[in-house]
Amino acid sequence: MNHAANHKKKIIPLLILIVAAALIFWFYGKSDQNYIGVVEATILSHTSEVSGKILEMPIELGFHVSKGDVIARIDSTTQQYAYEQLQFTLEKKKLALADLEVSGRDNQAKNSIAIAQSTYNSAASSNQKASLDYQNAQSLYDQGAISRDDLDKAKVAADSAANALTAAKAQLDNARSQSSAESMHLDIAQTESQLKEMKENLDKYTIRAVSDGVVMSKSYVLGDMVASGYNLADIASDNEKYFVFYLPIDDLYSIDYDQTYTVKGNGKSYTAVVKYIDVESEYTPKDMQTIANKNRESVKIKLLLPEDCPLKPGQEAKIEL
C-alpha cells in the first residue's frame, strides 16, 4: 500500500514537469516568428508580333541574356523587299518634285501617276504569283506532299503580297487625284510615314530580350514557323525578384503593403518591401513550414528584393517578423 502511494507521489511531479515543458514549448514555439521562403523571379514572355520562319534563335535553356540580346530572328525577306521598293518610290517622288519646282512645270500629276502605276503593276504581279503559289501549296498539302510549315510559309507570303497590293492601289488612287506641287509634298509626307511604319514592322522580325535574365523556356527551334501572337521564350528577370513566404492568417494584422523587412540568405541580409498579399488562404507548403506556420491556414506574401540582390530563383531564404 505504502509502495503504491510512493509510486504515485513520484509520478505526479513528473507529469507536472511534462505539462509545464509542453506549455513552455507551445508558448515559445508560437511566438517564434521565423519563416522560410523561396526567391521567385518575374517571368517575362517574349511573344512574336509577326508570322514567318525562324532563321536564328541563339538561346538555350539556362542561358543568361542581357537586355537587347537577340532571342530570335524571323524571315522578313518579303517585307524588306517591299520596304526597299517604297524607298525607291520616295526618292523618285522627291526627284519629280525637285524637277517640278526648278522647271516651273506643273507635271507632278503625270510623274506621280507613272510612279504609282509602276509600283502597282509590280505589286499586282507579285500578288498573283504568291496567290497561285499558295493555291498550289494547299493542293500539295492535301495530298500529303508538303508539311504544314511549308503551307504556312506560302500563306504568309500570299498575305504579305496582298497587303502590298492594297497599299499600291491606294497610292495609285492618291496619285490620280493630285495635280500640284503642294499635293506632291503631301504625297511625299505620306510615303515617309508609310516607310516609318514599315520600318517599325520590320523591327518586329527581330525579337530581343526586354530585360537581363535567365532563359526558362523555349517554345521553338531554328527553322520552325511561328505565327503572330505565339510565345517564343520565357525569361526570368534579374531586375525583379521576390521573396515568397506564407504568413498565418492570425498574424496578418502584423504586415502591410510597402513595409520593409530583412530577408536573410547565403549568410547575408537584404532589405525587401511588401508588394503582394494574397486574398485567399491555404495551408503552407511542406517545404516552407516552420513552427510559426505549420498546420495553420496561411496567405502568400511577396516581398520585392533589391535589384542588386544576388539570390537566384529557387534559392531558400528566411525572414523574421
Image: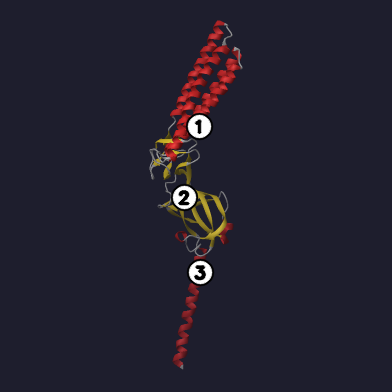
Q: Give the structural element (helix, strand or loop) at label 1.
A: helix
| Distance (Cα) linking label 3 and label 1 | 71 Å
Identity of the residue drawn at 47% across and 30% down: 132
Is 59 placed above or below 285 here?
above
Q: Position of residue 40 (x, y in %)?
A: 46, 50
Is 318 placed above or below 122 here?
below
Residue 306 appears in view:
no
Mark 2, residue position = 40
- Earlier-in-chain disc, 1 versus 2: 2
Q: Which mark is residue 245?
A: none
> For the residues carrying marks 3 and 1, which lies nearer the camera in this image?
1
Name the amino acid, label 3: Trp
Mark 1, residue position = 159
How dense is the environment of label 3, judged by Cα within 10 Å: few (below 14), some, or many (20 and up)? Answer: few
Name the amino acid, label 2: Glu
Q: Nearer the viewer, residue 279 or 246?
A: 279
Among the 4 quarters of the image, the one containing residue 104: top right
Identity of the residue drawn at 54% across and 60% down: 282
How dense is the environment of label 1, judged by Cα within 10 Å: few (below 14), some, or many (20 and up)? Answer: some
Q: Nearer the viewer, residue 243 or 223?
A: 223
Q: Nearer the viewer, residue 63 or 85?
A: 85
Is 92 placed above or below 54 here?
above
Name the amino acid, label 1: Asp
Mark 3, residue position = 26
Residue 83 appears in view:
yes
Q: Position of residue 209 (x, y in %)?
A: 45, 38
